[in-house]
């Protein structure tokens, strides 16, 4: 059974930085492309950024471009999201998930029937 554990969120002022981490068990981490998602109250979950299994392809959604950097360490089985120049609009719960595939310019959705983690809350004050 896939288990996902996100950490690193917190309260930060606008313009600040946070680094999120994600640990996945139940699947061979190095075999799967991974993605970061976020969800704000009253809104649907949206993609933020994704990375291929080997880390050679990265796709950023508009919300992440120029400010967020996704990375992974396949030895440690960790996925990261470095978030800089944070804005109040980035306030959300952030989740990670294994994806079906990542190609240049495209992140597929999360694998079906995964158990999403509890996420990590990011709150950006103005």
Image: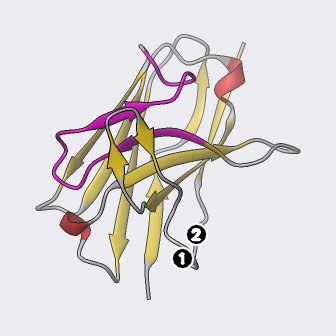
Residue range highlighted in magenta: 47-65
- Residue lying at 63% horizontally and 16% vertically, measured from the top left: 87
Q: In the rendered image, which residue does mark 2 sit on?
A: 116
Q: Position of residue 120 (x, y in %)?
A: 57, 51
**Seen from this angle, which residue lies furthest left?**
75
**Seen from this angle, which residue lies furthest right?**
42
Which labelled disc corresponds to residue 114?
A: 1
Which labelled disc corresponds to residue 87?
A: none
Task: Residue 89: say if magenta.
Answer: no
Write down the quadrant of residue 57 in the picture. Answer: top left
- Residue lying at 39% horizontally and 32% vertically, measured from the top left: 105
Do labels 2 and 1 touch, CB within 8 Å?
A: yes
Q: Nearer the viewer, mark 2 or mark 1?
A: 1
- Residue lying at 43% horizontally and 50% vertically, measured from the top left: 35
Q: Position of residue 122 (x, y in %)?
A: 61, 38
Look at the picture and state if 101 lies above or below 60: below
Distance of label 2 from label 1 (alpha carbons): 6 Å
Locate the C terminus by quadrant: top right
Helix, strand or loop at disc 2? Answer: loop
Look at the picture and state if 102 lies above or below 75: above
Q: Residues within 10 Å of mark 2 (few under 14, many from 20)?
A: some
Task: Residue 56: say if magenta.
Answer: yes
Helix, strand or loop at disc 1? Answer: loop
Locate the N terminus by quadrant: bottom left
Q: Position of residue 95 (x, y in %)?
A: 55, 54
Look at the picture and state if 62 lies above or below 44: above
Look at the picture and state if 55 lies above or below 3: above
Write down the quadrant of residue 31 in the picture. Answer: bottom left
Picture colour scheme:
secondary structure
């Amino acid at each position: 059974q896939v288990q996902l554990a996100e950490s690193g969120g917190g309260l930060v002022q606008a313009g600040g930085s946070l680094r999120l981490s994600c640990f996945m068990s139940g699947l061979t981490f190095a075999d799967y492309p991974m993605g970061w998602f976020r969800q704000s109250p009253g809104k649907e979950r949206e993609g933020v950024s994704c990375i291929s299994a080997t880390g050679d392809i990265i796709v950023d959604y508009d919300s992440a471009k120029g400010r967020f950097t996704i990375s992974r360490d396949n030895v440690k089985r960790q996925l990261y999201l470095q978030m800089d120049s944070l804005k109040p609009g980035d306030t959300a719960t952030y989740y990670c998930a294994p994806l079906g595939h990542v190609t240049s310019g495209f992140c597929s959705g999360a694998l079906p029937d995964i158990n999403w983690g509890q996420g990590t809350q990011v709150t950006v004050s103005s």
